[in-house]
Amino acid sequence: MSFRKGPQKARRISSFRRSLFAVAAATCVGAIALSGHAQAADAGKIGLDLPLLTSPFWQSYNNYLPKYAKDMGLDILAPVNSNGDPVQQITDMNNLLNLGAKGIVVGPLDSAAISRALDAAAAKNVPVVAVDVAPTQGKVAMVVRADNHAYGEKACKYIGEHVKSGKVVQIMGDLASVNGRDRSEAFRSCMKGFPGLSVLEIPAAWKGDVAATALDSLLTANPDVKGIYMQAGGVYLSPTLQTLRRKQMLFPAGDAKHVVIVSNDGIPQEFEAIRRGDIDATISQPADSYAKYGLFYIKAALAGQTFKPGPTDHGSNIIQLSPGVLEDQLPAPLVTKANVDDKALWGNTVK
């Protein structure tokens, strides 16, 4: 018995040494790989943080990024998807900083929470451009978004001109986002100019399933709804139409029973719904311009360029949101059946 323990122990020690060597080698390889990423980033890579990819709008935006990055000669890191989680977005931003990204373009999920990531970037002198959502705190080189008050106002005016009296539903976005707040407040305020209309609201936080469940209950109690404003067609279009169809309330435009529907986004699915007469209009949020000018401004920031409030050479207007924070307000046109086939408005389909 005793003479067997020696060889077994020796074999165990030998095996242990081989394991240590393998771990050390793997660690070395991993360190070299990580170093390679950091060195690549040090050469000028741009970090890209997507808020989510479940919406056709953000899928389209994501498809445009490599196209415009190539056109501008920018080297980009693989985009990260924060999947609708503001806490994950802060982690993702920190990971991009740790990889050595020299600039970051981000679509903030929460206007306030993103300040932690912006502060971390500022501490490393890494410029950040915010796309689609403006932060309420923190430093950014530029905010690139359309006038979200105009979204709510345009939707309100269209519905007000086509529905003379009755109930109108506003399916809202996330009120933790300045976009959700701007669209909601603008629609609500504008509706006061149409005394024959009353507004019912659904806070759906950009979640289609939440919108569908709440709309189903609301329509059961209010089968006389005459209009619907969806703040995000990318997530609300399909569940809204399915709910109306299930309630036997989906009639084409022109029918006396038609519910007037205005959306936001300008995705191909909305254009098809307009052609069918399922919905009446959408405010086309320019995913192509968001990608193009998000990258344009991060390139400018890295080159030390600064901007001032006023008209731009690309049909938009730069405003000052707060001291030191500028926003390029890109145009977002109203799309109806009259102009739905105008390809100049197809900002959410990669050309």
Image (cartoon, grey):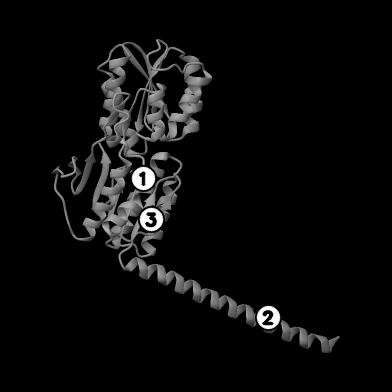
N-terminal of the pair, mark 1 or mark 2, is 2
Q: Which mark is residue 342?
A: none
- Give the quadrant of the N terminus: bottom right
Where does the image place residue 268, in percent across and percent down from the top left? 39, 34
Q: Which residue is mark 1?
A: 61
Q: Which mark is residue 93?
A: 3
Where is residue 283, by image quadrant? top left
Between circles 3 and 1, the one closer to the viewer is 1
Tell me whether the residue at label 1 lies in contact with that at label 2, contact meaning CB atoms closer than 8 angstroms.
no
Where is residue 17, by image quadrant? bottom right
In the image, 138 versus 66, the foreground residue is: 66
N-terminal of the pair, mark 3 or mark 1, is 1
Tell me whether the residue at label 2 lies in contact with that at label 3, contact meaning CB atoms closer than 8 angstroms.
no
Query: How many angstroms separate mark 3 from mark 1 (CA)?
Result: 18 Å
Q: Residue at x 25, y 30 (%)?
A: 150
- Local packing at callout 1 (Cα closer than 10 Å; few below 14, some 14-19, many 20+) is many
Where does the image place residue 120, in percent across and percent down from the top left? 33, 58
- Relative to 5, does residue 181 appear above or below in the rendering? above
- Local packing at callout 3 (Cα closer than 10 Å; few below 14, some 14-19, many 20+) is many
- Judge from the rendering whether residue 223 lies leftward or rightward of residue 135; answer left or right: right
- Relative to 296, does residue 334 appear above or below in the rendering? above
Q: Residue at x 35, y 15 (%)?
A: 198
Looking at numbered disc 1 in the image, what kind of residue is underneath it?
Answer: Tyr
Query: How many angstroms separate mark 2 from mark 3 (CA)?
Result: 41 Å
Looking at numbered disc 3 in the image, what kind of residue is underneath it?
Answer: Met
N-terminal of the pair, mark 2 or mark 3, is 2
Where is residue 224, by image quadrant? top left
Secondary structure state at the residue bearing disc 1? helix
Between circles 1 and 2, the one closer to the viewer is 1
Query: How many angstroms separate mark 1 from mark 2 (CA)?
Result: 52 Å
Q: Which residue is mark 2?
A: 15
